[in-house]
Image (spheres, rainbow, N blue to C red):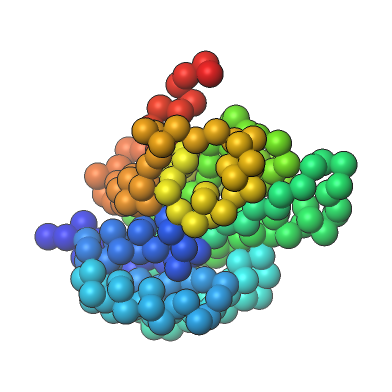
Amino acid sequence: MSRFQDKVALITGSTGGIGLAIALRLAADGARLALVAHHADELTSAADQARQAGAPDVWATACDVGVEAQVEAAVAGTLARFGRLDVVVNCAGLMEFKPLAELTTDDWQRALNVDLFGAFYFTKLAFKHMQPGGSIVNVSSIHAYETSPNVAPYAAAKAALGSLTRSAAIEGQPLGIRVNAVLPGAIDTPMLRDNPNVKSGAEKIDENNLGQPENVAEAVAYLASDAAAFVQGTELRVDGGRLVRLS
């Protein structure tokens, strides 16, 4: 039997490099999918790819994850379509590229809304609607631990996401809900290639340790599945060993 047969998975940021790879991995494992993304025009293609990958049913909706009312509508739509919610993957992400001295409150708020509050909103609703056996996987980043210049809001939000993961794991356990996180390193996506720090050389990428979105998707699928039934509150690095080295 497929790992996610008869289960419903909601994935945010589901049209991007890592988010789409996660959607396709869960689709191949039989999940019915609720695809959530900020840009509605990208959802049709993502939904078509998910069906081709094996998803028995796909529902897609545009949603700004930093707006609680839109998150509530996305979850309500998922429940109306499928009648249940078994997996939530918080993958939506936003990076601001400015020196600290030039950052504004609005810059910080935009990053926190997407990178932290969005995960909180979906976790809050999952706790209200998931049945025991449910799983939440947050897509964090190694920037939560080691970072580079000019991305302070992103790094701070991802560090806070780790703390949210641990707190949610504690509160989710009595509900029978597991909460874990993955921390991708350098993953070959447009977000990485377009990163001004990478282009300038401020953040150096070893091409020999450049991961693929599918590497992260496999880790997410494991944490979301029953195979990880005794894994709770962990942060799984998927970085090719980048943080192991001293330099």
Residue occupying the point 30% across, 48% down: 218
Q: Nearer the viewer, residue 198 or 237?
A: 198
Q: How many marks?
A: 0
Residue occupying the point 70% across, 52% down: 96
Q: Nearer the viewer, residue 30 or 129?
A: 30
Residue occupying the point 49% across, 57% down: 190
Q: Say if 23 sits above or below 105 in the image.
A: below
Residue 213 shows in this picture: yes
Q: Say if 168 sits above or below 10 in the image.
A: above
Q: Residue furthest left?
A: 1
Residue 106 occupies which quadrant of the picture? bottom right
Q: Say if 104 sits above or below 246 in the image.
A: below
Residue occupying the point 45% across, 21% down: 244
Q: Residue furthest top?
A: 246
Q: Is residue 156 left or right of residue 164?
A: right
* Quadrant (top left, top right, bottom left, bottom right) of the N terminus: bottom left
* Residue 57 percent across, percent down from the top left: 28, 79
Q: Nearer the viewer, residue 14 or 99?
A: 99
* Residue 181 percent across, percent down from the top left: 47, 43
* Residue 210 percent across, percent down from the top left: 40, 39
